[in-house]
């Protein structure tokens, strides 16, 4: 049995066998979209570069969170890859004709603003298009109506932060998501996790709780990032694609320590991480944040 503790919500127990398909929610990350809502309650947040050097989040929920999630924005090519790996239902605001076609042809269950039947809604106190949200009850409705098979993968075994040993002491990390998106993660001993700091907007907080988002384990995963000639944005922008299959170098940051590792992505479920000694580096209970960076790039 694996117990997955989610910061800010009740622990979810995943027992062997099939479980309902998770939700993969596309959340925006530019200054006008901050502060976002609901990221603290995700099991995993993937962060990756999109067109123009900005980053986007794909937040994976193994069950619907209690509060609001958003702002919700469009999908990208890596969204499709992640949805396949996790067997997830994609929740997004839409996308280019090419991206929408790829989602349909891949047979990925999905809901966008046009098909959500009110389960995605606008908050008129925030400026469009950075104001599309959902919440726990609406995401539960999406999950209950999604024609998605169950999944059998489990998340990693966890080590409480107070029990983590080894690695290299590390309390402040800068991650090169892109040339212009280089967030800093600082370890908060009292909180037992990493806080995020943006260069332009400062501390990364939750819009609903006004509390800092605390990341139990930060993972910097080096992947092949290649340009694509296909239009991936509704404004006609071409973008990039991320190869999240295979293996590569990674850094795992837990409990104020860094572990150099190798990642390997299986056919389904989360990537596996191992050190040079062949053991899984410590991954603490709570939110796991995976930054996809270009091969050869590393956190400093």
Image: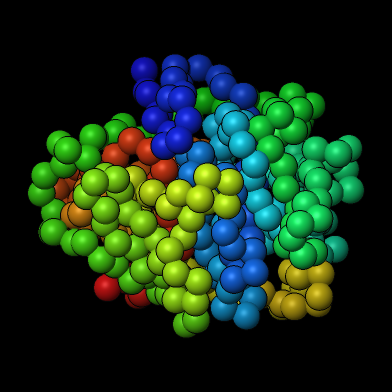
* Left or right of residue 248, residue 34 in this image: right
Q: Quadrant of residue 88?
A: top right
**Quarter the C terminus occupies:** bottom left
Can you give x and y, in whole percent of width and height, for residue 149 in the image? 67, 26
In this rendering, position of residue 80 left or right of residue 171? right
Which residue is drawn at the image coordinates 56% and 37% (left, top)?
Answer: 61
Q: Is residue 165 above or below residue 2?
A: below
- The residue drawn where x is 38% and y is 38% is 286
In-image side of 266 versus 256 (left or right): right
Residue plotted at (48% across, 55% down)? 205
In this view, the residue in front, 61 or 99, is 61
Q: Is residue 75 visible?
A: yes
Residue lying at 81% horizontally and 69% vertically, measured from the top left: 234
Quadrant of residue 2 in the image?
Answer: top left
Give how far across and how far down residue 121 sits, in percent: 81, 46
Question: Residue 202: horizontal and vertical position, in percent?
Answer: 44, 69
Picture quadrant where residue 261 is located: bottom left
């Amino acid at each position: 049995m694996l117990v997955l503790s989610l910061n800010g919500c009740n622990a979810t127990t995943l027992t062997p066998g099939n479980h309902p398909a998770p939700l993969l929610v596309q959340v925006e990350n530019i200054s006008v979209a901050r502060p976002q809502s609901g990221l603290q309650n995700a099991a995993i947040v993937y962060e990756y570069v999109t067109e123009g050097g900005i980053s986007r989040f794909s937040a994976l929920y193994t069950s619907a969170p209690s509060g609001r999630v958003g702002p919700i924005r469009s999908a990208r090519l890596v969204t499709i890859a992640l949805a396949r790996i996790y067997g997830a239902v994609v929740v997004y605001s839409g996308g280019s004709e090419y991206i929408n076609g790829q989602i349909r042809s891949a047979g990925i269950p999905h809901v966008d603003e046009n098909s959500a039947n009110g389960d995605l809604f606008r908050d008129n106190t925030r400026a469009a298009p950075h104001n599309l949200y959902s919440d726990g009850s609406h995401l539960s409705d999406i999950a209950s109506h999604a024609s998605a098979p169950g999944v059998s993968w489990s998340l990693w075994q966890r080590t409480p932060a107070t029990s983590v040993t080894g690695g290299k002491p590390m309390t402040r990390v800068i991650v090169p998501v892109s040339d212009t998106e280089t967030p800093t993660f600082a370890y908060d001993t009292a909180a037992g996790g990493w806080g995020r700091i943006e260069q332009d907007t400062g501390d990364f907080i939750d819009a609903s709780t006004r509390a800092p988002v605390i990341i139990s384990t930060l993972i910097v995963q080096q992947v092949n990032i290649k340009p694509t000639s296909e239009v991936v944005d509704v404004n006609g922008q071409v973008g990039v694609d991320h190869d999240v299959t295979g293996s590569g170098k990674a850094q795992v940051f837990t409990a104020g320590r860094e572990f150099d590792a190798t990642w390997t992505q299986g056919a389904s479920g989360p990537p596996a991480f191992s050190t040079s000694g062949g053991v899984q580096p410590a991954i603490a209970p709570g939110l796991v944040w995976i930054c996809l960076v270009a091969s050869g790039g590393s956190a400093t």
